[in-house]
Amino acid sequence: MPKHDGRVSVWLEPEKKRLRWYAPDGSRKSKAIIDYDSLSENEIENLRLTLELTFNNGNVNPITGILLPTVITMSQLWAHYQENQLLHLRGDSRKCYEAMWRLYIGPRWGKTKIDLVKTLDVERWLSEVKKQNGKRPSKEYVEKIRNVMSAMFSHAMRAELCNQNPISCGGSNIGHGGKRGTGAGARILGEFAEKRSLIHFKPEQNLAILGELEVRDRALVLLDAVLGLRRGELGGLHWEDCRFDADLFVIRHSFDWKGGIENPPKTERSAAKLPMHAVLKDALLMWQKETPYQRPQDYVFPSQKMRGRKPVDLKEVFVKKIRPVIERLGFAQPRDRYGWHSFRHGLGTALWDLTRDKLTVRDLLRHSSTSITERYMHGIDPRLVEAQDKLVTAIGLKKPQRRKKKAELLQMPHRAAIAAS
């Protein structure tokens, strides 16, 4: 591989476990890679990049091997980010980042030097992003793409690979207005696909759903609807995490069915202790009597096919057991978008209606900020309802009197009746 544009290129020869290059005089040179078999692909790539920069008068930190931003490309930054940051993320988040890079960021920006990535160029590109089917994605989808790029540049700044984040601008000082946040960076502009509203279930709907389920599935829905556990957290729950003597749950694991492994919970705040209501305790103790896997280290909801070594596939449980009940009761249609997370959204909405306390909703859902929690509180803002009521009263109009209908109360069937059925 000859030199090009006055630069020396270094490439890998895997068969002989060596790096090779052409010297400026045209002679072919090589260097053996020590401990080749014990190195990862990223480590080998970093060796190649370091050697290539050395030959081309690039500055390399001899201690850390960090490459300077004057020569590093977005692909090289991605490799550095993968090795040092991405591997520490939980499975779902890591796969999301990898998909965003593979489908969008890499094809457009991979060969671009990071100091040539400009805010307005990124903003223009984001306004033209299309999904694989050619349609314009939702605003939230485009925000994810932008956030992945921003995370890469934040990592580059921490590693001293660059001095600024062109995606968020890092709260840089602009004019005389003081510090500005992410609004100073690449903005999300243009027309987007219509946002689909996620179905959530009201407390009375949850009660009707619970009345149609068997013991195991009823315990699953209760934990989701009352505690707001995520699907992975439901799967990763062990009996030792259910402290029946102290009436509390300890959320320590999140199971990844694609990888077949246990991960830590999604965030640091997700790993928390939650109260165990008597209803939850009773439902779990009923299920514990039926399951053959009752040891402290056993999964609460084990897979019978895997003989308890892994939790049951909750996506399959929802499709085969929970979804038919919901649609039979008329709470959703077959084309609707919903799943286990709908119970979590329903919890956030119901708890906000009952308490009007965002901090309580945030802490039970274990969110890092109330801005995330607000996405789980559906319906009309009560401030708007109150303001409209005051306006109508000020005009002098009175509410029409309507006859009240007798409320129909749904009751949970007695467990003896469930057992008999």
Image: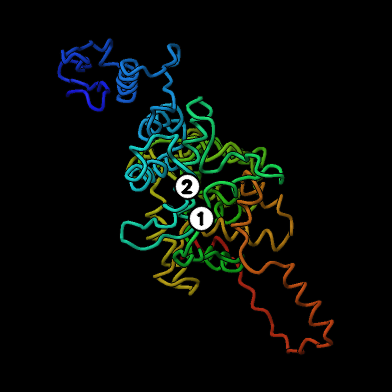
* Circle 1 residue: 188
Packing grade of label 2 (10 A; few <14, some 14-19, many >=20) is many
- Res 115 label: none
Foreground residue among 411 and 349: 349
Q: Position of residue 246 (x, y in %)?
A: 67, 38
**Visible residue check, residue 213:** yes
**Left or right of residue 228: residue 86:** left
Residue at 27% from the left image edge and 10% from the top image edge: 34
Q: Give me the residue at 50% from left, 58% from top.
A: 189
**Could you say where residue 377 lies in the image, as x and y percent from the top left?**
63, 60
Counting every numbered tag in the picture gives: 2
Check whether the beta carbons of the residues at disc 1 and disc 2 lie within 8 A of each other. Answer: yes
> Residue type at mark 2?
Arg
- The amino acid beneath tag 1 is Ile
> For residue 222, which quarter of the picture?
bottom right
User: At numbered mark 2, what does the secondary structure look like: helix, strand or loop?
Assistant: helix
Q: Secondary structure at mark 1?
A: loop
Q: Which residue is mark 2?
A: 146
Residue 244 is at least partly visible in this image: no
Side (left or right) of 168 relative to 149: right
